[in-house]
Image: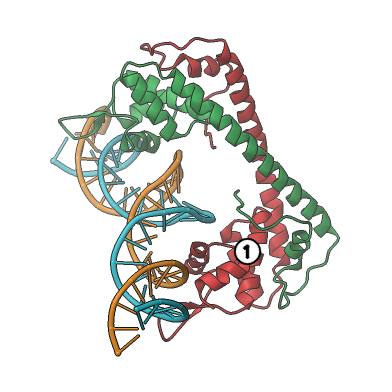
Chain colours: A green, B red, C cyan, D orange
Amino acid sequence: MHVKGLANKAGVRSYVVRYYTQIGLLTPSRDSDNGYRQFSTTDIYRVRFIRRAKLLGFKLSDIQRILADADAGQSPCREVRQIITRRANENRKRLQELNALQSRIESAVDVWESMPDQLPSHESLCHLIDAVAEMGGDIGKVEL
Amino acid sequence: MHVKGLANKAGVRSYVVRYYTQIGLLTPSRDSDNGYRQFSTTDIYRVRFIRRAKLLGFKLSDIQRILADADAGQSPCREVRQIITRRANENRKRLQELNALQSRIESAVDVWESMPDQLPSHESLCHLIDAVAEMGGDIGKVEL
DNA sequence: TACGACCTATACGTTGCACACAGCTCAAGT
DNA sequence: ACTTGAGCTGTGTGCAACGTATAGGTCGTA
């Protein structure tokens, strides 16, 4: 099985398979004829496992550690429990931030409905955005 | 004013100033003595504006367009309205996804409380993760 | 054997920083 | 005047997880 074959059976795109190979999540042999990556049927389970783990919010680097345990014949479940607990907390915080962002956006849209467009002045590049800045919060790290 | 000066007055780190310069959000001249980036006081407003816009979920590429309008003496507000409306919808979708993810995670943690760790078998690399896979959903694109 | 659809490989672009490293500047101390 | 040394500067590289651009290889059919 080559790249496309595995990709189809696992439900991902070809470049995903190549990327996972590149970072060591998959370790195919090479077809001696043409040098193509040669995958086994267990790689199908492996890729599906990776996607399921990502569904739960695991990062690929997490998954790498988990798979390393499994490959070594050890139960990765303890590792899994640790990671998922940490990730759950991170996500909770992230969700709060995003919810706050969305609130800011939606109230901004509301406010702007009734405001006219205006040319930029010296200290205000766009009063629409400055208007929201009044609504509080310092300018810390923001992520989308 | 050099990099650190602007960074302090605008409330960001030095490398942020350098990055914004690199992508063209800031266009300092160069100190003829030593080649350092030379900023003006209006750059302080500019950086603060950028941070406020980011607070509202604008991407730096959005901001670039907005600032280009403002630099050309045109009101960027129409552009702003368009972008923010689009972004609001995107964020709404993203929030739904993240909420769903968090639900999956938390119920997974609950389920796992009562499950024992287990060695990986042929078709199951980690039954803790496989257990959640049963709970539905295909393996589409997932983002953290 | 020639064609062309499809596959492959590598390499680079994306976003918004964060950091490593080496060199430069400037004030204080001797 | 000279030497520290802290702190600043510049460039360059790395990160996550792909997506894409490009050039070339392979295989079935005619």
Q: In the image, what residue type sits under mark 1?
A: Ile
Relative to A32, B58 lies left or right: right
Location of residue A131 (image quadrant): bottom right
Callout 1: chain: B
Question: Looking at the picture, how far across and down is residue B58, in whole percent?
Answer: 64, 56
Residue drawn at x 70%, y 55% is B84
State whether residue A21 appears in this view.
Answer: yes
Q: With respect to residue B66, does B135 lie above or below?
A: above
Relative to A47, A81 lies left or right: right
Q: With respect to residue B32, does B116 lie above or below?
A: above
Q: In this view of the protein, which residue sits in the foreground, B136 or A4?
A: B136
Q: In this view of the protein, which residue sits in the foreground, B83 or B128?
A: B128
Q: With respect to residue B33, does B144 lie above or below?
A: above
Relative to A130, B70 lies left or right: left
Question: Looking at the picture, how far across and down is residue B3, in whole percent?
Answer: 51, 72
Relative to A86, B54 lies left or right: right
Question: Looking at the picture, how far across and down is residue A100, in whole percent?
Answer: 72, 45
State whether residue A56 appears in this view.
Answer: no
Residue drawn at x 39%, y 11% is B119
Residue drawn at x 65%, y 38% is A95
Q: In this view of the protein, which residue sits in the foreground, B30 or A35?
A: B30
Q: Residues within 10 Å of mark 1 (few under 14, many from 20)?
A: many
Q: In this view of the protein, which residue sits in the foreground, A47 or A92?
A: A92
SS for tag 1? helix
Q: Quadrant of the N terminus of chain A?
A: top left
Q: Circle 1 is placed at which residue position?
A: B50
Residue drawn at x 72%, y 68% is A126
Question: Looking at the picture, how far across and down is residue B127, in whole percent?
Answer: 47, 14
